Amino acid sequence: MTPSARLQAAIEILDEVVAAAESGGAAADTLIARYFKTRRYAGSKDRRAVRDLAYAAIRRAGERPSSGRAAMVGLAQDRADVAALFDGSHNGPAPIGDEPAAPAGIAPGWLEEKLTVSLGADELPALLERAPLDLRVNRLKATREDVLPTIPDAVAGDLSPDAIRLPEGTKVEAMPAFEQGLIEVQDEGSQVIVAACAAAPGMTVVDLCAGAGGKTLALAGAMTGRGRLIACDVDRARLSRLAPRAERAGATFIEARLLDGGREARNLSDLDAQADVVLIDAPCSGTGTWRRNPEARWRLTPARLARLRALQAHVLSFGAPLVKPGGRLVYAVCSLLEEEGPAQVEAFLAANAGWEQLNPLAAGRPAGPGRRLTPAHDGTDGFFIAVLGRTC
């Protein structure tokens, strides 16, 4: 592909990303993979160049652009090398005329205002930088000291004793350590959430919004394979991905439980006041993960945020009763918005007696009744983490 043809391909992909953001369709990574699946002529260098152009335009445009071309014309305003490729050549984009250009920004205005309150304006640009690649060593099979020497360019993480950091783009799945189940891809901030659970061998631990089980597997390592670990979710497809991952990791003692949405309390009644730890990694806006999914900020609306807040409160309402007296409830969101983090936990504490705030974490900074990790301050994805102890 010529450089201009690569730019045109990026514009076509951006058209699909913009449409998907408006309709709730597939993520940008999925759309890019689909695009090249039907274009076998594109080599690895072509794919990398097109992907980089598309993501550069996505990161630059705070508001959802009117089209893929508008997003790229906006990028061309900042980059002469991109502007030069609008040359009208065969398979390339037409020259830039008097047409809309997407303005630069961090996020839609209403979101940028909220994030400025949470973080301060100086921290916002880091939300859109490229993220590093973090691994977690599987304690069921190895230690970090075992694994580090076997992986080129690997360095130990600062916040988690199991974390390893690699350059972005490293092919992890091709590593022998991955095939052997010694490592998993997991952001170091996510590992801090698991550390906050303080799970130990012999405990009963419930991962209430387990998804595909990334944190469940980390909890299994902390428990050294002993005790009772229940992974729950309402999404059958996501939860089904846990079983093969658990087998590779050697975490065969995990119990997977599919919940019926709206009837979760009934599905979990046998666990009332039985759990030493309940982890609620709640569904959220994902504002802390924009480094990996920058187009996600085009999908969020005030109405969707309100629905997420209601869902978070609902999960807390049926998750908290599972904790036994003396046990702990860990609430976490990969969001940097006050409403989904500090305000959500403050509302829970105000409405529910018999709980106290615990402070087991040194990572991050105080944020109401919990701690907040951010890309700018901690080098991780953005998270809010609160640890509550049940007193009676």
Image (tube, helix red, strand yellow):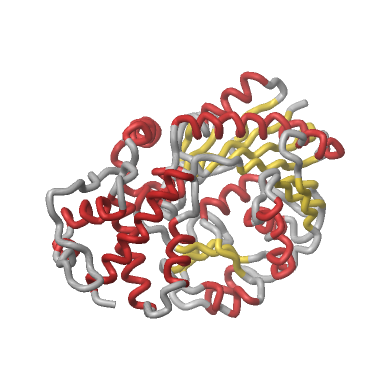
- Dividing the picture into quarters, in which one does residue 326 lie? top right
Position of 139 relative to 296 (above/below) = below
Residue 15 is situated, as x and y percent measured from the top left of the image, at 35, 55
Seen at 73% across and 50% down, the residue is 231
Residue 140 is situated, as x and y percent measured from the top left of the image, at 71, 66
Is residue 193 rendered to the left or right of residue 247? left
Is residue 229 rendered to the left or right of residue 339? right
Seen at 18% across and 67% down, the residue is 85
Position of 129 relative to 321 (above/below) = below
Seen at 54% across and 40% down, the residue is 284
Is residue 241 rendered to the left or right of residue 125? right
Q: Could you tell me how many numbered marks the image carries? A: 0
Is residue 294 rendered to the left or right of residue 260? left
Residue 367 is situated, as x and y percent measured from the top left of the image, at 48, 33
Seen at 42% across and 44% down, the residue is 22
Q: Which image quarter is the N terminus in? A: bottom left
Residue 69 is situated, as x and y percent measured from the top left of the image, at 26, 55
Pick the residue in front: 74 or 35: 35
- Dividing the picture into quarters, in which one does residue 181 lie? bottom right
Q: Which image quarter is the C terminus in? A: top right
